[in-house]
Amino acid sequence: MNILEKTSQEHILVVDDCIDNLYLMQFILENEGYQVMVAVNGEEALDKIHRCQPDLVLLDMMMPRMNGYEVVNRLREDSNFSLIPVFLVTADTYVSQSAAIAAGADGLLYKPINIEQLLFEVAKILANKQASFYSQD
């Protein structure tokens, strides 16, 4: 089996205050067989994470009230959720991968979303999460 091949139905939370971006990523991911939940702000994202504990969070950086950095920071401070992979998503090309990782994220995706890159990064991070889960057994 290819390491990037899905072995179960993973749950992904997509967070973006722009409804068009939110539904685009939801559509792409659901067509690949992922279960997708959506949230339009940081507070709603944290609520859904606490209730559903997704396998991955795709998180817009710039949102009103609570931005992506704040959400990542809260997740990393909570031992129940600190290991959930988070990819920040931004249209700001001045933000670097290293800055996103320094902020606590597992990676960074740029808007407009490149579908192939999105699917590759999602499959890779979920495969790595699954591999580390099985190596703990």
Image (cartoon, helix red, strand yellow):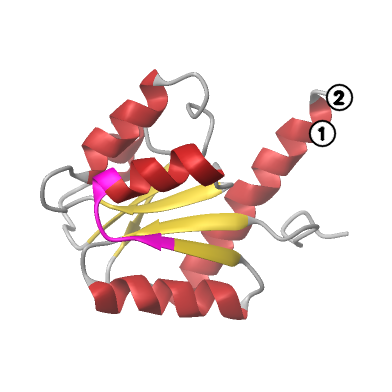
Residue 41 seen anywhere in this rendered image of the structure: yes
Q: Is residue 104 magenta?
A: no
Q: Is residue 39 magenta?
A: yes
Q: Residue 54's spot in the image, x, y percent?
A: 55, 47
Disc 1 to disc 2: CB gap under 8 Å: yes
The disc labelled 2 sits on which kind of residue?
Answer: Asp
Q: Which residues are magenta?
A: 38-43
In depth, the one of 11 and 114 nearer the eye is 11
Callout 1 secondary element: helix
Residue at the location (17% across, 42% down)?
66
Residue at the location (33% across, 35% down)?
72
Which residue is the site of mark 1?
A: 134
Residue 102 seen anywhere in this rendered image of the structure: no
Q: Is residue 5 above or below residue 105?
A: below
Dot 1 alpha-carbon crowd within 10 angstroms: few under 14, some 14 to 19, many 20 or more: few
Q: Quadrant of the C terminus?
A: top right
Q: Residue 77's spot in the image, x, y percent?
A: 37, 19
Residue at the location (37% across, 77% down)?
23
Side of 118 where 32 appears, left or right: right
The disc labelled 1 sits on which kind of residue?
Answer: Tyr
Q: Is residue 71 above or below residue 33?
A: above
Side of 80 where 113 appears, left or right: left
Dot 2 alpha-carbon crowd within 10 angstroms: few under 14, some 14 to 19, many 20 or more: few
The Cα–Cα distance between marks 1 and 2, rounded to whole angstroms, is 5 Å
Q: Residue 100's spot in the image, x, y percent?
A: 30, 39
Q: Quadrant of the N terminus?
A: bottom right
Which residue is the site of mark 2?
A: 137
Q: Residue 88's spot in the image, x, y percent?
A: 33, 49
